[in-house]
Image (cartoon, rainbow, N blue to C red):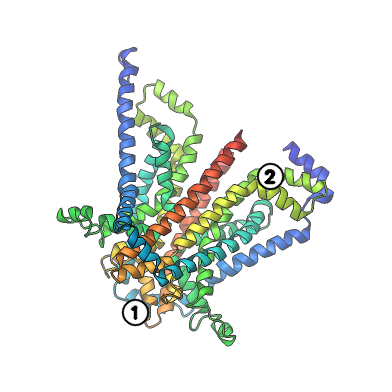
Amino acid sequence: MSAPGVTTGPIRKDRRGRAARVSLVGVALLYVVVLIVAPLGGILYYGLRSGLGAIGDTFAQGDVTHAFYLTFVIMLIAVAVTTVFGIVVAFVLARDDFPGKSLVSALVNLPLAVSPVVVGLMAVLLFGRGGWFEPFFAARGIQIMFALPSMVIVTIFISIPFVIREVVPLLEELGMDEEQAAWTLGASRLQTFFRITLPNIRWGLFYGMALSAARSIGEVGAVLVVSGQLQGRTETATLYILRAFDQYQAERGYVVALTLAAFSIVLLMTIEFFKRRSTKAMAR
Amino acid sequence: MVAQAASRLSGRARSNPGASARWTLRGTAFFYLGLFVVLPVAVILQRGYGDGLTNLKDALDTFGAWNAIRLTVVMALVTAIVNGVFGTLLAYVLVRIPFPGREVVSAIVDLPFAIPTLVAGVMLVALYGPSSAVGGWFQDHGLKIVFAPPGILLALLFVTLPLVVRRVQPVLSELDHEEEEAAHTLGAGGWTTFRKIVLPALRPAIVAGALLVFARSLGEFGAIVFVSGNIPNKTLTAPVFITQLLSPTSYGATNGPGEAAAIAALLFGLAFVVVLLTEKLISGRLERTQ
């Protein structure tokens, strides 16, 4: 467009630009509302419609409390394992160099591509009837399938990438100068890690752990396949939701679903708040 | 650089992690990934294709198999395109256009990472299901959302929205304004500037995000299982189909787990290749900017 008048051109263009900006924001907001905000409103409405009585009633159910307890236990173990080993893998990826390193990096991302259902299937093929390890554990009387161990294993698989993906870039950015200094001053390797490295990667690590936790809590496909859905025994909170809707107890299903969502949202938002504050402090 | 070299020189005697420590770390990492990632993948391949292609053939002969795969791939493609476009738009709005409540919108975009996928499905049924006012209104006007493909699409769009936005956003905020301003001064309109200057710079990030959306959508289960209704040949997707092959009551499957493994390896091999491509794209772009 060639501006005909030097004085009117920019003004007219500006007005048109303003209209364009407003409509862009409008379309973006509409998309977010239709996709996220409105459904969130829907579940809030159905979850809270019957009032506090229904919520109390839901949590008075033995299988509901057990489901939450089981979800919590699985989450704790999965987050602990993926955190400890995730830090080791992150160190190897960020600091070490060896042929085939990119392959290891690809392996870390693999769980992001694999469907949870397939993760469950993997566990069935390894530990289920006719599975590779079934004779070994059956001979020792250890129950893997339809029990806690298989549920923990699939949840670990699914949560592997989160800590690693948060920590690797931090370690790379951090460099080794501070560690070298501590090390030359006579600190042991463990001291260096706990006094220097860990505080530096803290918030990224916590964020990765929170993502792991949120993913563990919400996992359904993999757990569904391996758990056998034994009511009051291998039924997690998400599996309870599935059953509640199947058995026309939608009200309880909504309450449990709302609780799970609220927990994950509060967890992630809190940690993101601290993470943001710390990056701001570092920039200053 | 200098500091690094200096510290390396001064500290060489003590500071480089000893060989034993390095091998301990390496060994632990390999053991962990081998046990939890390599082994499960190996078992899928062996059990799915150990007897050649019989399992795959049997699985594909099962009622509804082909349509489940087709529906899954088509839905994943549409999701990748729609969220590629709207994800870019959202990133642009969040980075470039100041408006009241921008922080809130930014936080909302992250919600799908926090909300369990199953709960996302429950949410969509609550709002767009036939028993709610909104869903009822749409149904009266001839648009069935839940228990139909539009519901599947909504569920996939919901869970994958942050993937594109969060990839495009940092690239956009690092982008130099100068070129755009130059284009403006030369008389280019907003749209032309975006198409000629901004879009090419964002393209790798958009494509990478959309590829991830595609891969993620191929495997999604939790968000879909409620919304789709799982009607064979109509709304049954591949992940749900796989769970049906595995359930003891499944019809017609002679070797349920093996057949499930054959289909799984096929579909999720595709997803993994896509994720690898994405990583290549991202690291390629990083190398170029450095």
* Frontmost residue, A155 versus B20: A155
- From the top left corner, tell me how far across and down residue A239 is, in percent: 40, 69
What residue appears at the point 63 percent right and 60 percent down from the top-left corner? A84
Distance between mark 1 and mark 2 Cα atoms:
55 Å
Per the rendering, the mark at residue A160 is none
Give the chain letter at badge 2. A
Check contact, mark 1 vs mark 2: CB within 8 A: no
Amino acid on which disc 2 is placed? Gly
Is residue A100 visible in this depiction of the protein? no
- From the top left corner, tell me how far across and down residue B196 is, in percent: 40, 33
Image quarter (top left, top right, bottom left or bottom right) of the C terminus of chain B: top right
Name the residue that disc number 2 marks. A175
Per the rendering, the mark at residue B250 is 1
What residue appears at the point 58 percent right and 40 percent down from the top-left corner? A279
- From the top left corner, tell me how far across and down residue B64 is, in percent: 29, 72
Q: In terms of secondary structure, where does tag 1 sit?
A: loop
